[in-house]
Image (cartoon, rainbow, N blue to C red):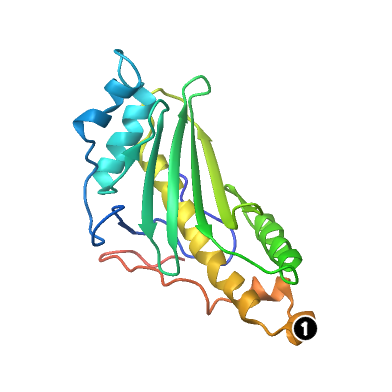
Amino acid sequence: QPITEIRGRRPRLPLEFTSQEVVGKNREKKITLPSHARPFHILGPMGPSRQFQSVIDTFGRQGWHSEPIEGREVIESSFEAHHTHIRLHAQVFTNLNALSIVAETPLKFDDLREPMALELVMRANKQLTIGNFEYDLDRGLVVFRATNIFERELYDGDIISSLVHCAIAELDRIVPLASVLNQTADDLLDDLSIPLLLEREDLLPPVPEYEGEEEEL
């Protein structure tokens, strides 16, 4: 079964996002690998593993533009979500038959707000059933990671897509909360409750509506 359920107040999955090329206007585009960068040139004469190929194929079917990382079974993509720009990596671990999705977005805090930002990230983690948040202090990035171990070498495309949707949706959920923290005046920070901030539904990104979608009970 695809992973499509996340506990807590957040957008339902799956969500739709538009892939962004590194250069040029945002537009949907199926994966295209230049001849000099095709996986079978990077990974040796045997070509990409079945696991990695299934990830490439899934990104292609979804219309997500991506580029391979030379010498590794990793592809990189970028997305414009509702609140932020997200950089995403999908890495295959063939020895574990696993896929790791790592999404990140820049968010910096001053010394006064940094402890509260770390509290925000850790409290958000308590709400999760899939993946986890991290804050990269050195690079000023909020990171979301999610990993799935598959039963078969040919990865399920629905699960791959759900992991990507999950990572983007979670980052898009936490960014406006962090922005509230950054915009709160210094003399009012003592009055800002992180647990209550996490309960705010007015800052959630909109949930797309699908034709013919049945109402949830």
Quadrant of the rendered structure where residue 190 is?
A: bottom right
Give whichever of 31, 33 is nearer the camera.
33
Question: Residue 152 placed where, x, y %?
Answer: 42, 24
Residue nearest the viewer, comparing 159 with 110: 110
Determine the image quadrant of residue 161: top left
Q: Secondary structure at mark 1?
A: helix
Is 103 left, or right, of 20 in this rendering? Answer: right
Badge 1 density bin: few <14, some 14–19, many ≥20, Cα 10 Å: few
Q: In the displayed image of the protein, which residue is found farthest to the right? A: 190
Rendered position, 152 above or below 158: above
What is the tally of numbered marks visible in this picture? 1
Q: Answer with left or right where residue 149 lies relative to residue 118.
A: left
Residue 1 position within the rendered picture, expressed as x and y whole percent measured from the top left: 44, 40
Residue at the outermost top position: 45
Front residue of this view, candidates 53 and 8: 53
Identify the residue at horizontal 53%, vertical 80% (top origin).
202
Residue carrying label 1 = 191
Query: Residue at left 43%, top 65%?
Result: 216
**In the rendered image, the vertical position of residue 197 relative to residue 31, given as above or below:** below
Q: Residue 169: give x, y in percent of width and height.
A: 47, 59
Task: Judge left or right: residue 158 versus residue 35.
Answer: right
Above or below residue 197? Residue 124 is: above
Q: Nearer the viewer, residue 49 or 196?
A: 49
- Looking at the image, is 133 positioned above or below residue 76? below
Does any portion of residue 1 appear in the rendered image? no
Residue 132 seen by the camera: yes
Residue positioned 76% across, 64% down in the render: 115
Image location of residue 192, percent across then percent down: 73, 80
- Tell me the amino acid under the disc marked 1: Asp
